[in-house]
Amino acid sequence: MADQGRYHFLFEQHPFRDVAEPLTRDANMTSRKLYVFKTCQSFESRKVDAVLMPCFASHTFRDELQSELSIRIVNMMDALGQALRDALPEGGRIGVLASDYVRVAALFDTHFRQRYEIVYPTTTTQAVLMEAVYGADGIKAGNTEGLSLEHVHQSCLELLDAGASLIVPGMTELSLVATALQRRGIPIVDVNQIYADYATSLADGQFNPAFKLGIVGGVGPAATVDFMGKIVSNTVASKDQDHIKMVVEQNPQIPDRTANLLRHEADPTVALYATCKRLESEGANAIAIPCNTAHAYVERIQPHLSIPIVNMLTETIGHIVGKYGKGTKVGLLATSGTVESRVYHDAAAGQLELITPPPDFQAMVMEAIYGPTGVKAGYTQGHCAASLRAAIEHLQNKGAQVQILGCTELPLVFSQTDSFPVGSASVALVDPTDVLAKRCVQLASSAQA
């Protein structure tokens, strides 16, 4: 109340079919997990900054939830740990009143065993405690006085007799009787108060979710799969969990970019934008479009997005300048739409000398991509490879010792290499999708550093 201008509180409670189920040692958490996750997703969609989850059972799977959300779930065990450090020296003994399920899940042992000695009620007292909280006349049913309070009181006394200097509830319902127990001289903490104090003391924006890459797929479909493979192969990882999160919309129905640029057929701008917005809503931190020609539309789309599109063209030009030097003569093998839109020329302006095939060889490149035996038809050898090789050799004869495979299907025919044989000589082939993949991996690593 002292800082009302800082907070906007949202509270959500939906029907939960297992709400009355006691947290026994073998309680099934599936419906609880999905209920909490869906509620957190609802908060996430409303741009909430942080979620409070005052439930110890739910904190046994907090990490599972957090890994799938872009908003922070404030950790109740961290809050409790901070309060214990202020109240009890290391090596002290704490008595824990937790449900059977939380005890078996070892939530308190995992977080506090290295710092404190933990004691729990005996088996008989634990059964009485469970009834006092979850029974028909228990605290969860609204009975905070009478027999339920007496049973909790006796449980606390047993823990104090066992040497505990502080009672720590592992059931948030016990906050409802914490004041009454404190009046009786029980040194019990109010975990809900601790959690609330901790949450409101946090600085804004402390949560750093795992980096997620959004991919506009289907332009073309095989190139998308190739790009994802390059993300994986360029990631240093020793296990599955070391790899980058990716959300992909494989949308082959996005209108053909070359057809629009050359013949003014269906405009793909809205389809590209809509796909990007869906990736944005899925929590992507950045977007990759493994399609060279589609970059002719990036300037139209980017101002209307809140996350960046990693520009494959500028990354490719930067890579070439860094490796081969400024002013290098570079051949561009791309769709006629990419060539005529001059998006690569604009990116290379003042840095590289770009040359493109003359009309007859450009027709060979288009045949290799769009022809009946081209890459988009599923071919990577034979006529399409011969046509592409002829265009490469022509540009090499014109002085282009470095050539860009400027259509994402072309690396499916010839891979990136520093020495592609052309007659008695060789040229370097640059794969923009590999350059883009490495840049995305770098972004992910920097975000998690």
Image (spheres, helix red, strand yellow):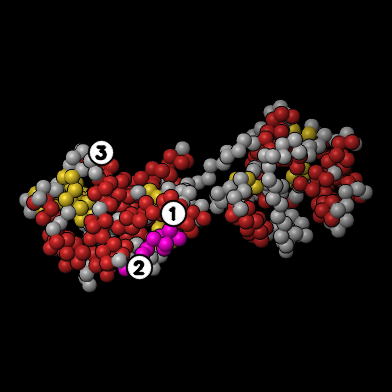
What secondary structure is marked by label 2?
Answer: loop
Q: Amino acid at mark 3?
A: Gly
Quarter assignment of residue 371: bottom left
Residue closest to the far top: 89
| 279 over 371 or under it: above or below | above
What residue is disc 1 on? 214
Kindly report which numbered mark, 2 or 3, lies closer to the viewer in this rendering.
2
What's drawn in magenta, residue-wise?
265-275
Q: Quadrant of the N terminus?
A: top right
- Whether residue 431 is visible to the viewer of this picture, yes or no, is no
Residue closest to the far front: 264
Asked whether the residues under the numbered discs 2 and 3 touch, taking CB atoms below 8 Å apart as contact, a structural biologist would say: no
What residue is disc 2 on? 266
**At 32% from the left edge and 50% from the top edge, which residue is drawn?**
312
**At 33% from the left edge and 54% from the top edge, which residue is drawn?**
295
| 39 over 348 or under it: above or below | below
Q: Mark 1 to mark 2: distance in Å?
A: 24 Å
| Magenta segment main secondary structure | helix
What secondary structure is marked by label 3?
Answer: helix
Which of disc 2 and disc 1 is earlier in sequence?
Answer: 1
What residue is disc 3 on? 322
**At 25% from the left edge and 38% from the top edge, which residue is drawn?**
322
| 16 over 130 or under it: above or below | below
